[in-house]
Amino acid sequence: MNDTTTTTNQPLVDVKGLRVAFSGKEVVHGIDFQIAEGEKLALVGESGSGKTVTALSLLRLVQNADLAGVARLFGPERSQNTRDLLSIPERELRGIRGKEIAMIFQEPMTALNALYTVGDQIAEVLELHEGLSARAAQAAAVQLLADTGIPEPARRARAFPHQLSGGQRQRAMIAMALACKPRLLLADEPTTALDVTVRAQILELLAELQRKYGMAVLLIMHDLNLVRHFADRVAVMENGYIVEHGAVATVFDAPQHAYTRKLIDSHPERDVAAVAARPDAAPVLEASALRVSYPISKPGFAGWFRKGEFVAVQGADFRIVPGETLGVVGESGSGKSTLALAALGLLKHRGMLKVDGKGWAVGRASDLALRRTMQVVFQDPFSSLSPRMTVEQIVGEGLRVHAPELDTAARRARALTALVDVGLTEVQFPSLLDRYPHEFSGGPRQRLAIARALIVDPQLLVLVEPTSALDVTIQKQVLGLLQRLQRERGLSYLLITHDVEVIRAMAHQVIVMKDGAILETGPVERVLDAPEHPYTQKLVAAALLE
C-alpha cells in the first residue's frame, strides 16, 4: 500500500517496494513509505507484523535476510548525493550507520556492551565518525549524557551498563544515538521495558531532542496510545503489509481498517465481580508490619567487619479475602516484586505473614501444603517455561508434587482439562501435549503458565507483571481470561504491576509502593480516581498520557 500523504518538507527517505524474506519465506511484502526531514513517523503493529524488520532493513542489520526494493536516502540537497540504502556497498553503509542514521534498540541492557563504560561506548562513536581525540570524545560524551537528563553525567559516564537503572540505560542509548547528530533516528520500542512514568519522560525527551536537532524519527511501537502523543504520521502494519497510514489525528479519530480499530480498542476493560466475602471473612493472605531486608557491603574499612542493610520492604500491612484482587503498583525498585517473593515464602522476612491462616516455615516440609494454596504466574512465559519440557510435563508438573497418587493417565486428563480452561485445545494446536514452549506465541505461552498454576486448584495466584511482555490485543485477552477464572473459581489474586490501567481493570484494592514503603492504599476507585499522595498522582497522570 503506497503512502500518498503529502508533506511540506522534502523527503529524507523514500522506500518503494521493500520486501524482506528469510529462506524464501517473505515477511515484508512490497511496502512503500516516506519519511520527511524533521518528521516523526510511527510504524505500528503487533509482534510479528514486520515493523522491526522493516526498520533494521534500512541499515541492512537483519542477518540472513533477502532484501528487495529501493530505500533512497536523499542528501541535504535533493538532487545531490542520493543513495539507495539497500544496494550501496557495505563500506559506504558503515559510514552512514551512526552518523546519518542512528538507532535506539529495544533493550539497552543487551544493546550496550557490558565490558565497557557508558562514556567509552559513546566516545567510540565520536572518535570513529567525527575524528575527535579520546579526551575531546569523552568530554562530548559527558555533555551528551547531560543533554539526556542523566544526573551526575560525569560519574555516570564512568559507570558500566549494569550500574545504571533502566531509564538511565535508555537515556545512555539515546545519547549514543545522537552523538553525531543524525538526520534520521530509528527508535525500536524505546519505552517497552520501562516504568509508566519513565516511559513518558523518555518520549518527552525524544520529542525535545528531535526539535533541538531537527532530525526525523521513525518510531517502532505496538502501542497506539503512546504514538498519539508523539508522532506526526502513523503507518499501521499487519502481517508484513501497511494496512493504513495517515496523519495521527486522522487515523485515531476515523480509523478505516479493522486491524487499526482493533489496536485502538485494545485497552484493558474492567469486568470483575464485587467481592462476596464478608468483611470479617478469613483472609487467604494477610501481612502485618512485613519487613524484608538484604545485607550489603559497607564502603571503606568498616565493610571489612560488618555488613550494612538495605530495606526492600518496610512495615507493609495488607489482607486479601476470597475472590478479591489486591493490586500492588509502583516503579522498578519500589519493592513490589520483593513483597511478592516474601508472600510466596521465597524470602526471609520479619513481621506477620500468613497464607490461609498459617505462616511460612521457609524451606521446611510443612510449607508444601501452602504452596498448593498459593501459585505464581511470572512476567515472561518464555523464560519461566522450561524449553526442554513438553506441555504435558510443564502443566502436569505440579501434580507430581502435590498429587503423587495420580497415575500418568490421570495426570494427562487433568492437564488437558486445565488447558481447556485457559482456552487451549487440540483443535487449535494438534498434538498439544507433545509440543514445546517455543512452538507458541506470547499469548498462548502465558495461557500455558496460567494452566500450570491452576492445575493444583490454588486459592490464590500471585501475578507478577502477567501482561507486560504481551502485545496490547493479547494483553486484553489474557486479562479477560483471568477475570473469567476469578468469577468461576472464586480465586484471589495478588497482582504486581507498574501498569496503572491493568490495576484499574483488575483490582478491588490497591497498594501504591515507593522505596519499599506503602504510600497509599484503599479501594481502587478511590485511589486512582482521587489519589491523595503526590507519587500516586504522578503515576496516574503518566498513565493518562499514555
Image: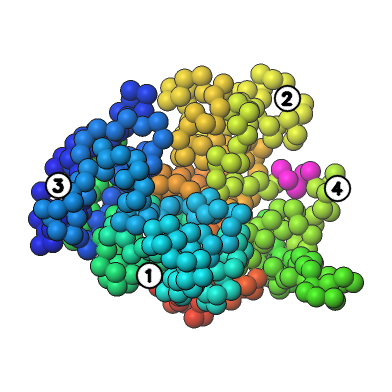
Q: Is the residue 454 above or below the residue 37 in the image?
A: above
Identified by mark 1, the residue type is Leu
Give the number of the disc on residue 3.
3
Q: Is the residue 7 above or below the residue 402 in the image?
A: below
Give the number of the disc on residue 406.
2
Label 2 Cα neighbours within 10 Å, binned few <14 / some 14-19 / many ≥20 = few
Sooner in the amino-acid sequence: mark 2 or mark 3: 3
Sooner in the amino-acid sequence: mark 1 or mark 2: 1
- Callout count: 4
Asked which quadrant contains residue 249, the reply is bottom left
**323 or 150, which is in the foreground?**
150
Cα distance in 3D space between marks 4 and 2: 24 Å
What x and y, as percent, mark residue 484?
Answer: 47, 45
Sooner in the amino-acid sequence: mark 4 or mark 2: 4
Give the number of the disc on residue 205.
1
The answer to whether residue 525 is seen in the rendering is: no
- Name the image quarter holding the N terminus: top left
Name the front one of labels 1 and 2: 1
Q: Which span is picked out in magenta?
A: 368-372
**Kind of element beneath mark 3:** loop
**Residue at 63%, 28% in the rendered image:** 389
Name the front one of labels 2 and 3: 3
What x and y, as percent, mark residue 84?
Answer: 22, 43
Q: Is residue 55 magenta?
A: no
**403 or 73, which is in the foreground?**
73
**235 or 523, which is in the foreground?**
235
**Residue at 34%, 40% in the rendered image:** 90
Q: Is the residue 147 above or below the residue 471 in the image?
A: below
Identified by mark 3, the residue type is Asp
Cα distance in 3D space between marks 1 and 2: 58 Å
What x and y, as percent, mark residue 110?
Answer: 53, 50
